[in-house]
Amino acid sequence: MGHHITALIVTGEPDPAAAAGWGVEPVPLGEGRWLVPVTHYFTAYWQARLGETAALDVPASFPVVFPREGVVLRLAAALATGPFALVMTDYFGGVGDQWACVFAGGRRVGGVERINAALRELGVERRGGLDEFDTVGLGAHRHPPEELDRYEALCDELGV
């Protein structure tokens, strides 16, 4: 079974009006953390649509489909206050990899490149012999919602 997500993990309850305006549906993870699924097409679309030119400070070793668009900072700030993580998984049958960055005050928190480390930066504490990933239930979110599929065509329409 695969696990392929790209998402923001925000702290604090997201603003429902902002979520609707951006076309996202935050999912509660508990303890004041929310999963906001995105895709690289989603971030590329909003980057172009809003005329954003900034890029995120993301390690060069991350895959090309890991969002690098600066519009991610605008999205996170619109949804909630506080630090957030941008995470991505690509696993199938237990083989694959994961990537993560944490941002606070518009800047990347250095040294964080794995999801468990990112969740620790957001204050997640392991429980019941589980790692941070499983403590917040990320294993239950295996694929992006189908609603995000439309952003591939929208990017084509915009020529991005």
Image: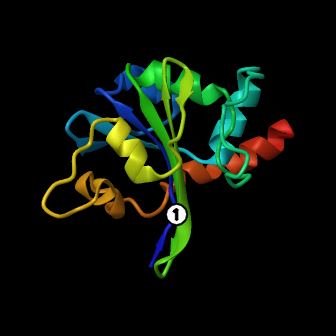
Of 35 and 83, nearer the camera is 83
Compared to 97, does 133 lie above or below?
A: above
Quarter of the figure with residue 154? top right
137 above or below 75?
below
Q: Quadrant of the N terminus?
A: bottom left
Residue 31 shown left or right of residue 19 in the figure: left
x, y percentage for residue 99? 55, 53
- Packing grade of label 1 (10 A; few <14, some 14-19, many >=20) is some
Quadrant where the C terminus sits is top right
In the picture, measured across the screen, residue 40 lies left or right of residue 24, that is right
- Residue plotted at (29% across, 53% down): 132
Task: Pick the residue in front: 157 or 88.
Answer: 88
Circle 1 residue = 4
Q: Position of residue 77 (x, y in %)?
A: 48, 20
Secondary structure, mark 1, is loop
Q: Amino acid at mark 1?
A: His
Name above or below for residue 113 compared with residue 107: below
- Hey, which quadrant is residue 97 in on the image? bottom right
Q: Which residue lies most toward the left here? A: 128
Q: Residue furthest front?
A: 111
- Residue 131 point in image, percent of width and height: 28, 59
Closer to the camera in the image, 139 or 135: 135
Pinpoint residue 50: horizontal percent, then vertical percent: 71, 21
